[in-house]
Image: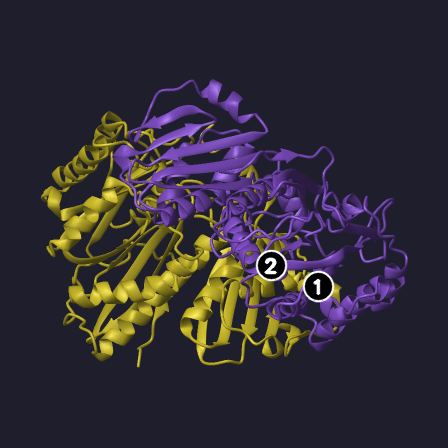
Chain colours: A yellow, B purple
Amino acid sequence: MAGAIEFVDGGTITTPKGFVAGATYAGLKTFAEDKLDLGILFSEAPCNTAGVFTTSTVKSPGVTMDKERLAQGIPMRGLIVNAGIANTCVGEQGYIDAIEMTGLAASKTGVTPEEVLVCSTGVIGVELPMSLIREGVGHIDLDGQGGSDLARAIMTTDTRPKETAVTFELDGRQVHLGGIAKGSGMIHPNMATMLSFIATDAAVEPGFLQSTLSEIADVTYNMLTIDGDSSTNDTVLVMANGVAGNAPVTAGSPDADTFTEALRQVCTHLTRELARDGEGASHLIVVEVAGAANTTDARNGAKTIASSSLVKSAVFGTDPNWGRVLAALGRSRAEVDEDKIDLFINGVCIMEAGKPIPFHRDAVVALMKRPEVTFRLQLHLGDGEATAWGCDLTEEYVIINSAYTT
Amino acid sequence: MAGAIEFVDGGTITTPKGFVAGATYAGLKTFAEDKLDLGILFSEAPCNTAGVFTTSTVKSPGVTMDKERLAQGIPMRGLIVNAGIANTCVGEQGYIDAIEMTGLAASKTGVTPEEVLVCSTGVIGVELPMSLIREGVGHIDLDGQGGSDLARAIMTTDTRPKETAVTFELDGRQVHLGGIAKGSGMIHPNMATMLSFIATDAAVEPGFLQSTLSEIADVTYNMLTIDGDSSTNDTVLVMANGVAGNAPVTAGSPDADTFTEALRQVCTHLTRELARDGEGASHLIVVEVAGAANTTDARNGAKTIASSSLVKSAVFGTDPNWGRVLAALGRSRAEVDEDKIDLFINGVCIMEAGKPIPFHRDAVVALMKRPEVTFRLQLHLGDGEATAWGCDLTEEYVIINSAYTT
């Protein structure tokens, strides 16, 4: 059973002990007051580190390099990240620049380049202006309050930083787990969209850390997007430095459940924040599918509904057009018996046993004006359940994305 | 080798001999001058008939009934179709109404209900007002010039009817093949979106007719949408009445190639018209993928690019943001070697061997202002090739779809 997990007021990625961070404006994004676009996260102690990455066949050399470094199994010390330029589709130079970025961070912090990871996000097909990055790294001040600056530095079309942290007990020690994330377009993740970095001062066995991250990413970040959808740079990293002094968490231990639950809560929080801040979004959409024949059906159904442009447009217009929800469910190929489906919009039953029930349209429209619209489907076929998150499709989305490079 | 195939000026579904059609305004759509919403197609001779249908697990009872009737293998005489209401998700009453609709058309034309098919398109979850339909059927005048009225009667958010016909020779006889179609939203087909009906006065063996339709639908209508995407009512029907008097076309004959090519040309024409008239669309998008490792990769790549909201938004903004094209290609999981990819936008090479080549942004922006924007990718890996069609994503799309039922 998981112990008590509490969110930390103002928590961020440097809430866990032994982590420092900092960021600067290096000139990669269009200038604006207080803008940041280059940052470093560093741990005073070596970190067991796990990652999940884009499945796209077109990917940033940074992603390829990070996967190689994690595969070596050596502890990591930090990461360097830039926003504004994705360092993708630029040929051999991309690898050279990715390696140099880790070298710059390593020199600054006194570790080897092989102990540093790199991430980039932004426009594809543009080479990194390395002279600006070299200059910028020199201006980064690393400290224990730097997490929020790092959260701001990774933003692209995000309207606000996403950061959180929790605290809980493991092995009689108070430990912390904090993370940051950036996203933007939610239909198809925008150029190099989804980055999330998580730090913990808990000691965690590396194999368990990786399997837990993969499991949790599957029910959080991977439920933000349509099936198989992934950008060129998507990366989630978890670094565990063990500064809290607990006995390392291993698979199957009681602490494993607590740690997994803490990671789930942080990733769910960040996922919801990513959905809520989808480009142009005015509503967070939550789709819960229960009673599916199996988990795969539940996942596919929930994701297909959450990513349907018609459902998203209807939510924008606060139009209780539930036919589109059912059409998306059917399109997902989830097994259904139409005569058994119940559908709730923000808790109000719109359809019972497959038939629309009379409702006051005005009342449902009023419910849908809330910033969060939840569709809950009960299929009454089995035990499969899943939750997906998305946002509505607005005119603002089109305006943002019709002139991204110009 | 296929013989000469010529498009017929003003051609439509009643261009083939022996077909009559007609339509009326029955009151299923919001009234407007000259609006039509209920129609019948009828053949003076029995027709070998083939169909392809939605793969959605939530489907209209009309689709289920049509599949059952075609499975019996008896020739068909006609079809009845309404727009405005999809007759989907209305429980048992949906089946009863679908059967009654075929009965009404059968009584009017003097055939049995089992020789008639039915299609509906429009809003889901609303029962058909059968009294309006009974009344409406009485007002339909069937004649050999009625095809264009039928094309208008099946429109929902379409801004114009889609119809065409070709003529060619088979077995020394002049034959005709004509069709109509309706669509609308192209990201995810709108409620009960895609209907297409095709008639021919050629005699065609039924097994060959079905296999040819399936093959052609796969490279035309099925290349309009994202992978697996399908609405509750999607239906394509081909009726061949043999009035032209040719020896029936069978698989493997020279006539088979000619017939297949004629069907391909008509379906391609209608597919392009559907894409061009996508909801709110200002550009037709054509994506050609060549040199893929195999056909599946080419198809997945082309469809993923054509359905990418980011690509679609960029085309709307005439933004030569080719990074999004590559990101979508990678996301499709098509095998790629980044260092081999060539990309052309409207014939202008934007990337060669995986590297962006300097281009005059203004020139490409000017090219993209054309009503048709073609992305051509040469992957240099194999012989796989495919073409997909789509349209841009505009603010108008969101406006249309945010208030469809209200």
Instruction: Specify the amino acid type for callout 1.
Output: Leu
- Asked if A203 appears above or below A158 in the picture, the reply is below
- Asked if B317 appears above or below B33 in the picture, the reply is above
User: Which residue is found at the position 88% from the left and 52% from the top?
Assistant: B141
Residue A63, horizontal then vertical, whole percent: 25, 46
State the image quarter where residue A18 is shown.
bottom left
Residue A15, horizontal then vertical, whole percent: 28, 57
Drawn side of residue B160 relative to residue B275, left or right: right
Quadrant where the N terminus of chain A lies?
bottom left
Q: Which mark is residue B51?
A: 2
Give B358 or A287, whichever is nearer the viewer: B358
Q: Are marks 1 and 2 in contact (CB under 8 Å)?
A: yes
Give B162 or A70, whichever is nearer the viewer: B162
Give B333 or B139, whichever is nearer the viewer: B139
Which mark is first along the chain, 2 or 1?
Answer: 2
Crowdedness near tag 1: few (<14), some (14–19) or many (≥20) residues, C-alpha within 10 Å:
many
Q: Which mark is residue A314?
A: none
Q: Which mark is residue B117?
A: 1
Residue B38, horizontal then vertical, whole percent: 80, 56
Instruction: Specify the amino acid type for callout 2.
Output: Gly
Tag 2 subunit: B
- Asked if B64 appears above or below B301 in the picture, the reply is below
Drawn side of residue B124 relative to residue A183, left or right: right
Element type at mark 1? strand
